[in-house]
Amino acid sequence: MEIAVVGAGIIGLTVAHRLAGEGHRVTLIAPAEEPHKASTGNAGTIAGYAVDPVGTPEVLRDLPRLLLNRDSPLAIHRPSALRLAPWLWRFARQAGPRGAEANRRVLARILGDADSRWRGLAFSLGAGGLLREAGALYAYDTVEGLNAAEAGMDRRRAHGVTVERLDASQLLALEPRLPPGRFGGGMLFPGTLWLSDPAAMLTRIEAALRVARIEARVTALTRRGAGWQVTHEEGAQEVEAVVLAAGAWSARLLKPLGVRVPLTAERGYHLEFDRVEKVARPLCPVRRGFYFTPMAGRLRAAGTVELGGIGAAPSPHRWDWLEEGVRSVFPDLPPPSRRWMGLRPSVPDSLPVVGLARKGLVCAFGHGHLGLTLAPWTAERVSAALAGGPLDEAVSPLRFNR
Ligand SMILES: Cc1cc2nc3c(=O)[nH]c(=O)nc-3n(C[C@H](O)[C@H](O)[C@H](O)COP(=O)(O)OP(=O)(O)OC[C@H]3O[C@@H](n4cnc5c(N)ncnc54)[C@H](O)[C@@H]3O)c2cc1C
């Protein structure tokens, strides 16, 4: 089949790699540079344990306080506030106990084999060296915070996630560079993976691709006979099928087709500290909402949420707030070597949009906090959607019009 894949983040690249490997003639279309694409600057965790949606009853209870405070782990990009209202309304409706549990159940199913899928992909590329395996940690400021997290961890355990509770001394034994007394304890997700350099993984996948490449932004998708015309800045392509994997930018290409998806950006930020070694595995100081991830030659602190603002400049105060959180754990760090902001493509129920929107038009976007983790799974599902097989139960909640 002649297929255009729109977008060259982790989703577009992984999909293109899989489809080309299956013998399809693939054209990958995306601009050469996209400084705010989420796939380069993320925290790098293969987070099969992250089965909680963003919207939960706990978050819902705190939502007004969180959103009104511009220094909170979940803030709003104020100039976008009005435009965000419908998205927030849907988010709130999904975040009750029943909605959150239904979304958690779907996430648990699609995240299930994330580690083994990633091993398969990385080793097939000869990029196994970019995978690290030592688990991931949540760290709690106080014992009370640790105790309060137990109920949520039990919910994860009920979905098959392995979690080990650590008291303060066990946490220090695992992470001896943490300041003694800084945390009351932690939760360990043992044996999980992370990438030591997400951008390097993109480069490895791109280098292995046997596809045509057009470096341009797609401006329109139009039905043409049995196939599609993909119009872009350099011209137009006629193809039999299109996979839309343009991250947070995807919805605007669907709107003229009458397909409306509640997609926004959750802007995330990172700071990097060159030649700094502080943690042996990704560690999230939970109250602050970011990860310290050990990466090749540097420490990355990545995370936090600022809702809205596709196309707007980064908010410098979010970097300041992130740095304050970083120094609340490691006060002796040097000044950051670089800083970055990227757009998580996010849907109110925290589930990606994967599957056919029209005949020959497959959606593969909206992965929110879990796009890296879910990339190999998504490529499998896109391939199945193009093959026209019956929808399996795990995928039907991911329809564009759910
Ligand atoms: C701070 C932060 C931390 C994160 N941590 C993790 C983590 O630890 N684990 C995890 O699993 N996930 C994590 N994520 C989420 C993950 O990074 C994203 O879900 C994922 O990268 C989304 O990939 P994508 O390919 O859909 O989008 P992107 O990476 O944003 O790529 C979109 C692509 O579409 C292209 N594009 C846009 N418009 C057009 C157009 N009109 N025509 C053609 N191409 C277009 C862009 O140029 C780009 O190539 C994190 C995200 C952030 C921001």
Image (tube, helix red, strand yellow):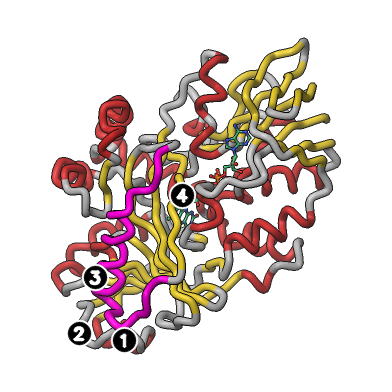
Mark closest to the chain's N terminus, 1 or 2: 1
- Distance from disc 1 to disc 4, alpha carbons, whole Å, reads 32 Å
Identify the residue position indicated by label 2 in the image: 181
| Residue 4 vertical position relative to residue 315 in the rendered view, above or below | above
- Distance from disc 1 to disc 2, alpha carbons, whole Å, reads 9 Å
Q: Residue at x 32, y 46 (%)?
A: 306
Label 3 close to label 4 by CB (< 8 Å): no
| Residue 17 vertical position relative to residue 296 in the rendered view, above or below | above
Identify the residue position indicated by label 4 in the image: 342
Q: Residue 217, how many percent across, how many down? A: 64, 33
| Residue 171 vertical position relative to residue 197 in the rendered view, above or below | below
- Distance from disc 3 to disc 4, alpha carbons, whole Å, reads 26 Å
Query: Mark 4: which secondary structure?
Result: strand
What amino acid is found at the position of numbered circle 3 in the picture? Tyr
Q: Residue at x 65, y 21 (%)?
A: 221
Using the image, tell me which numbered label, if any, was put on residue 172.
Answer: 1
- Distance from disc 2 to disc 4, alpha carbons, whole Å, reads 33 Å
Q: Is residue 7 left or right of residue 350?
A: right
Q: Residue 67, how many percent across, how many down? A: 20, 43
State which mark lies toward you, 1 or 4: 4
Q: Is residue 58 left or right of residue 50?
A: left
Mark closest to the chain's N terminus, 1 or 4: 1
Using the image, tell me which numbered label, if any, was put on residue 140.
Answer: 3
Span of residues in magenta: 312-336
Q: Residue at x 31, y 30 (%)?
A: 84
Residue 201 placement: quadrant: bottom right
